Amino acid sequence: MAKLVVHMAKYAVRSFSCASKENLLSFPISRMSLHLSRSIATTQCLKADRLYTETHEWIIVDGKVGIIGISDHAQKSLGDVVYAQLPDVESVIEKGAEVGALESVKAVSDLCSPISGKVIEKNEAVEKTPAIINSSCYDKGWLFKVELSNLDEIKDLMNEEAYNSYLKSDPH
């Protein structure tokens, strides 16, 4: 069991940048369950790294790559998403520019890029089955990945706490 827990801790350190070997291996192994070690390594890391725009897109930055999607607030406001037009791979996009659209039974919403860079991947599963956005906007419903061209643009984005305050204060 101890070897398995150590192996999982090493995997978590490689997979999640905010985890460290010291933090994960400092728990008493005899009392730590495998489930507990996974939840500590994954849940808080992903939430802490997500940044938001005023137009309700989110981004998780890992090195020079950003994974982009829409917030839970946005998907709830849209309703059932029936069509997703995502930017093409190799497209060069600018921060704030319209890069696609999401269509729901209620409305059509422009998709704006939270960051500048080159699109390196798009979520083809979302284009085939747009309802994934409604069921899993932060996990399986990510929209596209960008190789960032200007890391300083991240400073203009909101962390989760600031975004939640923004939602409470602004009539959108």
Image (cartoon, grey):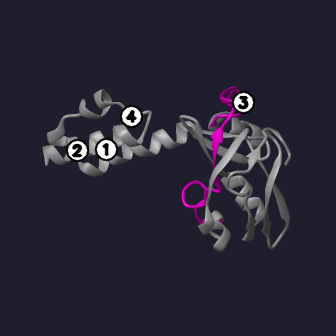
Q: Position of residue 93 (x, y in %)?
A: 76, 45
Instruction: Please report the residue visible at 64 percent of the width from the left and 66 percent of the height from the top.
Output: 126
Answer with mark 4 or mark 3, whichever residue precedes in sequence: 4
Which of the 4 image quadrants contains residue 11?
Answer: top left
Identity of the amino acid at label 3? Glu
Q: Are marks 2 and 1 in contact (CB under 8 Å)?
A: yes
- Residue 140 located within the stretch drawn in magenta: yes
Other residues around mark 3 within 10 Å, as few (<14) / some (14–19) / many (≥20): few
Query: Dot 2 corresponds to which residue?
Result: 7
Query: Dot 1 corresponds to which residue?
Result: 11
Identity of the amino acid at label 2? His
Query: Dot 4 corresponds to which residue?
Result: 19
Real-space CA distance between mark 1 and mark 4, rounded to the nearest whole angstrom: 10 Å
Real-space CA distance between mark 2 and mark 3, rounded to the nearest whole angstrom: 36 Å
Q: Nearer the viewer, mark 1 or mark 4?
A: 1
Element assignment for label 1: helix
